[in-house]
Amino acid sequence: MIQGFRDFILKGHVVDLAVAVVIGAAFGAVVNAFVASVLMPLIALLTGTPNFDEFLAFGDIKVGVFLTALVNFLLVAAAVYFAVVLPMNKVIERRNARLAAGQAPAEEEADAQIVLLTEIRDALRSRS
């Protein structure tokens, strides 16, 4: 039972997923800091306040709180798009253009055992 658990934990996919979660959390902190420390103060310069919490407040119904959350979401999405998605799309586009131009990556050498087995198979076919 312990051996099975150890094998499960040491599989590459589980470790890769754990690394992705940790890196994602760290990157989330960077994006949130960028939005809170750079983008929201820019909004404050334009509107006089970094949030819309008191905007359209009707007693206990505060539409401005929703607007603040919506603006934060859009700013985080824009930061992720321009910092991660757009550069990755450019890298993939360049790679695909290189592949289309005939600069295909070198093929891996065939395993020596597979080459030997192929030769044996061909020799047996030629004897028949």
Image: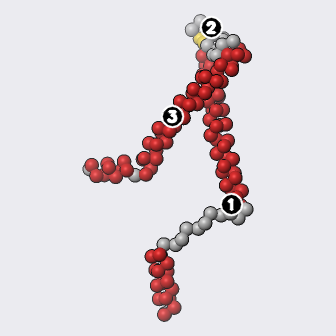
In the rendered image, the vertical position of residue 124 relative to residue 14, given as above or below: below
- Residue 18 in sight here: yes
| Left or right, residue 94 beside residue 128 | right
- Secondary element under disc 1, as helix, strand or loop, is helix
- Secondary element under disc 3, as helix, strand or loop, is helix
Residue 90, percent across and down? Answer: 69, 47
Residue 48, percent across and down? Answer: 69, 12
In the rendered image, the vertical position of residue 90 relative to residue 52, given as above or below: below
Residue 18: which quarter of the image? top left
Residue of label 3: 26
Image point (54%, 71%), residue name: 109
| Left or right, residue 124 beside residue 106 | left
- Residue 67 in sight here: no
Residue of label 1: 99
In the rendered image, the vertical position of residue 13 relative to residue 30, given as above or below: below
Residue furthest to the left in view is 1
Looking at the picture, the colour scheme in use is secondary structure
Image point (65%, 64%), residue name: 104
In the rendered image, the vertical position of residue 39 relative to residue 102, given as above or below: above
Find out whether the residues at labels 1 and 3 contact each other: C-beta distance under 8 Å: no
Q: CA distance from mark 1 to mark 3?
A: 34 Å
Residue 31: which quarter of the image? top right
